[in-house]
Amino acid sequence: MSMEATRLEQLGPISSAAPKAPAPRTVPRNWSHLLLLTPNLIWIGLFMAGALVVLATMSFRGYEAGGRGILRTWELTHYAAFLGDPFYRDILWRSLGMAVQVTLWCLILGFPLAYMLSRLRGWSRALLYFTILMPLLTSAVVRTFGWMILLSNNGFLNKTLISLGLTEAPIPMMYRMTGIVIALVEVLLPFMVLALDAALLNIDRQLYDAARNLGAGATRIFLLITLPLSLPGIISGSLLVFVLAISAFVTPALIGGPRIPVISTLIHQQGIALLNWPFGAAISFVMLFTLLVLLAVTLSLAAKAEGRAR
Amino acid sequence: MILTFVNALILLFLTAPIIVVVATAFTTTGYPVFPPQGFTLKWFERFLAMPEFTEAVRRSAMLALASTAIAAVLGTFSALALARWQGRGQKAVAALMLSPILFPAIVLGLALLVFYSQIGLAGSFNGLIIAHSLITTPFVIRLVMASLSEFDPALEEAARNLGAGWWRTFLQITLPLIRPGVLAGAVFAFILSFDELVVTLFLAGPGMATLPVRIYTYVEYSSTPTISAISTTLILAWVLIGVPVYVRFLSIKHV
Amino acid sequence: MSMTDLELIGLTKTYGSGAAVDNLNLSVAAGELVAFLGPSGCGKTTTLRMVAGFVEPTGGTIRVQGRDITELAPNKRDMGMVFQSYALFPHMTVARNIAFGLHARRVRRSEVAPRVAAALDLVGLSGMEDRYPRQLSGGQQQRVALARVLALRPKLLLFDEPLSNLDAKLRVQMRHEIRRLQKEVGITALFVTHDQEEAMTIADRIVVINAGRIEQAGTPAEIYDHPTTRFVADFIGTANLISGTVRNGRFRSKRGLEFPLPTATASSIGEMALAIRPEKIDIAPTPSPGQLAGRVTRRTRLGSVIEYELALASGDILVVQEQGRAGVDQHEPGSTVGLQWRREDLRLLP
């Protein structure tokens, strides 16, 4: 076997250029990370942060409808107008209420689906996962359009309810909050399911075996083990759905129409139809502020829940 | 089992609007009705004959292509840096870069509109491309990071130990191994950009309507099976592209 | 004329919580295989990775063949590292894996193929060029990892616990393979391991590391027969350690056991530990008068060796190992036996 060693030997040292003086490490390790991140940081910094700063500035500018338009003044009129006027406050409450309803229903419907998904393995799991994810591939407009067809007074849903004898007259759902909630729940359900599934997968299987071994039945296991331990997922899923619900535009716009304004349609109206950018900006920041408060509260709740689930 | 039955109903609920849209694309009636009556392909023909829609498709595709290219590059670089960075700022920077996912599109739309008007990008196609790339990059980051987490860091160290410089290591070792993640991220970004409506509504200049914008304005005022036909085509396209990429991404993850 | 191939001078690495490697000094001669041995977290891997260039030292110097390479990037150091997970590139064939380093160093095209073939031959894997790593067994992957670094004829070979993922039999086999190859190609090597048997078998010299510091460096025989600290005596093999004090040439254990010491150590004074290897104690079936006596409290059969636990009158416990031979009576638990040993087998440790 030493023949092979000498054969490798015979090939001689690797014929490359004579070694120069040792070059120092050109870029320290952490700096190279920063280098890779810089393009994206610039991108986000300029276009997202920059745009938000400009918008914030705009929210303090005066506006003369039908007159000179945007003024170069500094005023709080828009914030006062929004928070002071009961009409606008109602819209805010309505939007919050809508988001809460959507979140609750997503939880109720999402949990069974997520529970089943988390128990599957291999191909059946991949298939179910894809089926749940697939609606996300279709744009919100398409899905909302489908709901418009389903929810109209002559639509399939009402016709079925009438033929089943559950109601005598068609239940109005289009141009009503009911319709918006139904459609939004469908649109956002996958997000909740995915968040719950991730949390459920984290629960050690052996806890269930231990519980059964100690004599617990299915209900007890669900209430005392599954639910508490999946709390992090419930919180993160709810947060995601809530934020997406409040920011949703297409669904409330098409199904609610002008009769049921919510915050996002209001912003759109002010910004595009009425060109009252300052007011639109102020509303946007009220919305952002609300979301920020919510995020802070949720994250602290989540931190506590995470601690217990370990 | 009750659970399976309940879940079947929920799944039905989840896919209901899609089923309705696809079904009504073939109805012979002049307006979308479910269940559909008759069978015809004329709505598809009609849609293909309407330049405002075919033009919009082309525009959406170009926009999606351009913004995906940017998102793929920015996203991959960011994911590489974030995955290997153990330092203190990592969590904050990662949160910052992933924030566009949660950020309300309606606010972003208005903000960019106002911002663009100050810097002369208002109503421009480039402005749209930038906006779309902002929205889709976080998804690329997420998917590439998932791919990287399956990746033994010793592989890059081995390459360096054997004499490879940064570039060679990246090209021959890192890139091939994260390719599934980059691909999945790019496909996802493309679909997201193509389907994007809200921000585009704010930023699209005259004559720049993308397909979702066209569909939206159409649906606002009328309701014809043509819309169903367009939607069905889109759904089919995304499923045909999405499934193979998804399958490949999943299977690579488990290797 | 042995040249010093590798010098570690004052090598230190501190993290926020403390020093992982603390002022390490070591000289390795050309062609030597030095094992870094120690418990997990002792700093042996950190030291190896500093030599490889993946960790930046907080202080100190690393010299290879006289040249200071401390600031050199890892891909310019001309060392070959074999990783614990082998780190074979999964998307490349065996041949491409081995050729990778050659291409990186811009070896002429015509030279690459013969070198790859020669390297595969050296590790006994000729003909596997077109296989992918996932098609190979653990032992085969290990050999490819070896071939990949050997093909480059580096100045230094670095092994980071390469055998941990193999089953026991294969581990023993590969141990000898690695040593054989290393001796054949004559490249200086550093071998990190937590397995003392491995270190004893494979190394020319063992460096025992504990909490970032070198406890003792020496040949396997030196380390085993003449440990200089309690840690080394305890970490290598089993040792009976009895704490006590030394005064006037006599040793007195904490529990009152007393005996004279070998003259060589008679000058030591103060708190010490007495160490004696279990196989260096002889058991006499019945204690003769004046001889140290102990009661057998446990008897265990360890393969070919029988291990006894003996309780002395003073309360100290000793572990004794005897070769089990058929026909020779084993000592019964509960019986009282006599103990003796040679004075020169005693070690006094600070």
Image (cartoon, coloured by chain):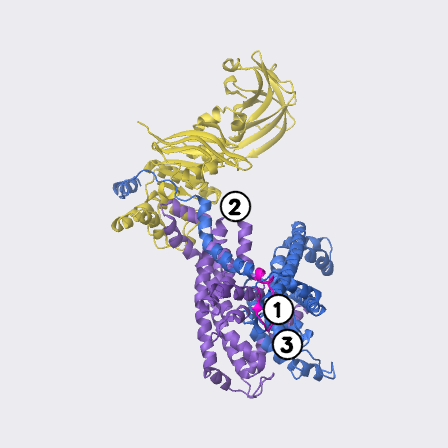
- Whether pointer 1 and pointer 3 mark residues with C-beta atoms closer than 8 Å, the reply is no
- Distance from the alpha carbon under mark 3 to that under mark 2: 49 Å
How much space separates mark 2 and mark 1, taking CA atoms?
Answer: 38 Å
Q: Dot 2, crowdedness within 10 Å: few (<14), some or many (≥20)?
A: few
User: Is C232 drawn above or below residue C149 in the view shown?
Assistant: above
Q: Say if the magenta span includes residue B163.
A: no
- Where is the N terminus of chain C found, in terms of image quarters? top left
**Secondary structure type for disc 2:** loop
Residue A264's disc number: 1
Who comes first in sequence, dot 1 or dot 3? 3
| Chain shaded purple | B
Q: How far apart are the alpha carbons under marks 1 and 3?
A: 12 Å
Q: Is residue A57 above or below residue C156?
A: below
**Residue beneath the point at 51% across and 20% down:** C345
Identify the amino acid type marked 2.
Answer: Gly
Q: Is residue A121 visible?
A: no
Q: Which chain is represented by blue in the image?
A: A
- Residue A57 counted in the magenta span: yes
Front: mark 2 or 1:
1
Determine the secondary structure under disc 1.
Answer: helix
On the rendered structure, is C303 left or right of C60? right
> Could you tell me residue C272's position as x and y percent?
57, 20
- Identify the hue of chain C: yellow
Give residue C64's quadrant in the image.
top left
